[in-house]
Image (cartoon, rainbow, N blue to C red):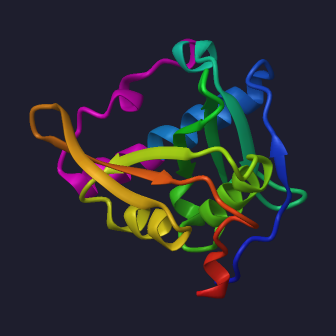
Amino acid sequence: MAKTTGAVRPLDLGHDATAAAVHRIGRAAYAVEAELIGFDGIPALSESLAELRERPLSWLGAGPEEGPLAGFLAWEREPDGSVCVDRLCVDPAWFRRGVASVLLRALLDGVPADRPVTVSTGAANAPAVALYERFGFARGADFSPAPGLVMASFTLAPRTGAAADPAAG
């Protein structure tokens, strides 16, 4: 299958159809992650649409120029200026087409090089772990926020020059 080169655009969750698409994609993506990591208590799986919309996050979406949303990334800027990726979800119908990479690249291109970026994912989520490592994130300590759940933490340290380019390696 061809990779998507669709536009990355800011998302407004105040728009009902956009919020519904984000909610649907998030649930589908987290259901796959739950299978991968053997833990079905991922908070986003039980998050209501209203709860999702209340989150103080910035949102990016990607997909074909004239088509449905294929995936999204949500993040927040911390008081120290660092950026924390809250969630990166791809519609399972769009897996392995470069959507997550396009979204992560767009975020990193907008983060000043002197600011770290952090993210966490299920430690057993091999595709997500590989993505963050490909982009130059260093794996930190694993942690367990709930019994039966092991999360991996990652940090992309402040960079000199351009952010890591996974296409180059």
- The residue most toward the right is 66
Q: Residue at x 36, y 46 (%)?
A: 31
Q: Nearer the viewer, residue 38 or 112?
A: 112
Coordinates of residue 25 in the picture (x, y in percent): 56, 43
Q: Is residue 24 above or below residue 16?
A: below
Nearest the eye: 26 or 9: 9
> The N terminus lies in which quarter of the figure?
bottom right
At 69% from the left edge and 27% from the top edge, which residue is drawn? 19
Residue at image point 33% right, 67% down: 126
Q: Which residue is situated farthest in the left direction here?
A: 147
Residue 132 relative to residue 21: left or right = left
The percent position of residue 147, horizontal first and vertical second, equals 9, 32
Q: Is residue 90 magenta?
A: no
Q: Which residues are magenta?
A: 29-50
Give the mark count: 0
Q: Is residue 164 above or below residue 84?
A: below
Quadrant in the picture for residue 123? bottom left
Write down the quadrant of residue 66 in the picture. bottom right
Question: Could you say where residue 68 lies in the image, as x and y percent from the top left?
Answer: 76, 51
Note whether 42 is above or below 46 in the view shown.
Answer: below
Q: Is residue 121 visible?
A: yes
Q: Nearer the viewer, residue 25 or 12?
A: 12
Q: Is residue 64 left or right of residue 95?
A: right
Q: Main secondary structure of the magenta part?
A: helix
Q: Residue at x 65, y 63 (%)?
A: 99
Quadrant (top left, top right, bottom left, bottom right) of the C terminus: bottom right
**Could you tell me residue 133's position as x and y percent?**
45, 68
> In this orientation, does residue 69 appear?
no
Q: Is residue 36 magenta?
A: yes
